[in-house]
Image: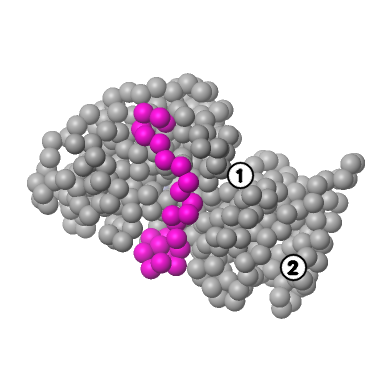
Amino acid sequence: MSAIVDAIHNLGGGSKQEVGVEQPLRDNPSFVLRGIHDTYYEDRAIPAVGPHDVLIEISKTGICGSDVHYHEHACIGDFVLGEPMVLGHESSGIIVRVGASVKTHKLGDRVSLEPGVSCRTCPACKSGHYELCPDMQFAATPPFTGGTLGRYYSLPSDIAHLIPDSMTMEDGAMIEPLAVGVHSVSNLAGVKAGQIVAVFGAGPVGLLCMAVAKALGASQVIAIDINAGRLEFAGNYAASSTFLPPPLEPNEKRMDYSRRATGLLRAKLGLPERGTGAVDVVIEASGAEVCVQMGCFLVKEQGKYVQVGMGSPDVQIPLTSLATKQATFVGSFRYGSGDYPLAISLVASGKIDLKPLVTHRYEFTEAVEAFAATKDGKGRDGKGIIKAIINCPK
Ligand SMILES: [Zn+2]
Ligand SMILES: [Zn+2]
């Protein structure tokens, strides 16, 4: 029985139910965080399905750095865990209930979940930037207590994005972090064919930013990371060149280091400071202060710098360098209008391959192990984890 259910959730192509026939719902086992390293399984109430909603039976859920951060610290910045919260927000699943007014979805449809429900009426929502909605209810983000590491999740139908049969349910779960890359590289940086793009940080989001830049036709995609193994992976995946920054010298100030390391990067890759052949776009996906500084030095005149990584909250930036180049420095938060559809189309058309990034898989009952392994960056096979995926409950 479980092998059949597994096959359905792996391959998709419709659930076990006949089209148009509702099957009875089951229990809703959920993986709940109550405090630092304090998790438990609980049978939670099945979420309500309003007239414009669909109920999704979860297939696959990727573990994200933010999930691990909540597991380790019970907070991220101002988002502090209060009530026990279900973890998980990178998921795919199958539609098992359709709200009375929904015309776009049917039972058995395979979807990628966009796990943030905005208010739809505030100035940010009305301006088209719903990612900035102050009343967003986002999975696994306090004060909201829902998350996708359970059996069922309910969403308004327009953010339960249909995926084609050519995509696996793991692909569907990976669309969430890919949408972060699409938002920063396409939507905010506006990368165009022929541009030179540098990405700081070769973790999952950095790698996906590189993949988007390549897919959009960047002529060069430069990966920068202090981990040689990650850089090697990036070079085989989507980067056309890589740079391993040197160590900090004793007593060297960070800003001096960043200036020096940027010079070395330019020399190694033959990049001019300005004009043709210089770096048009910097995507900062590490959050490290020296990477922020290097990125500001590296971006060319009138270039774009996009901050995706969340790391040190207070960093010193070389303001004169940005000002005298008239460079644009822009923040990036999650994803917004059009990002999921573009992410899905880049994968469906074969321009981005997500499969190499899924390195480890765990059962639902092994969630604690999956979190510990993702934090350590190593699976039980001793190999480095890029993305670990948790299977749906049996
Ligand atoms: Zn995430
Ligand atoms: Zn809003």
Give the extent of the magenta segment. 342-367
Residue 249 at x, y = what percent? 87, 45
Q: Give the total of numbered labels.
A: 2
Q: Taking the image as drawn, is residue 237 in sight? A: yes
354 falls in the magenta region: yes
193 lies left or right of 366: right
Q: Residues within 10 Å of mark 1 (few under 14, many from 20)?
A: some
Q: Quadrant of the N terminus?
A: top left
Q: Position of residue 326 (x, y in %)?
A: 72, 67
**Farthest-out residue, bottom:** 276
Check residue 310 in the rendering and tell me which mark sits there, or answer none. 1
**Is residue 110 shown above or below 326?**
above
Q: Height in image: 331 above or below 46?
A: below
Return the residue at label 2.
269
Which quadrant of the structure image shows residue 306? bottom right
**Residue 102 visible to the viewer:** no
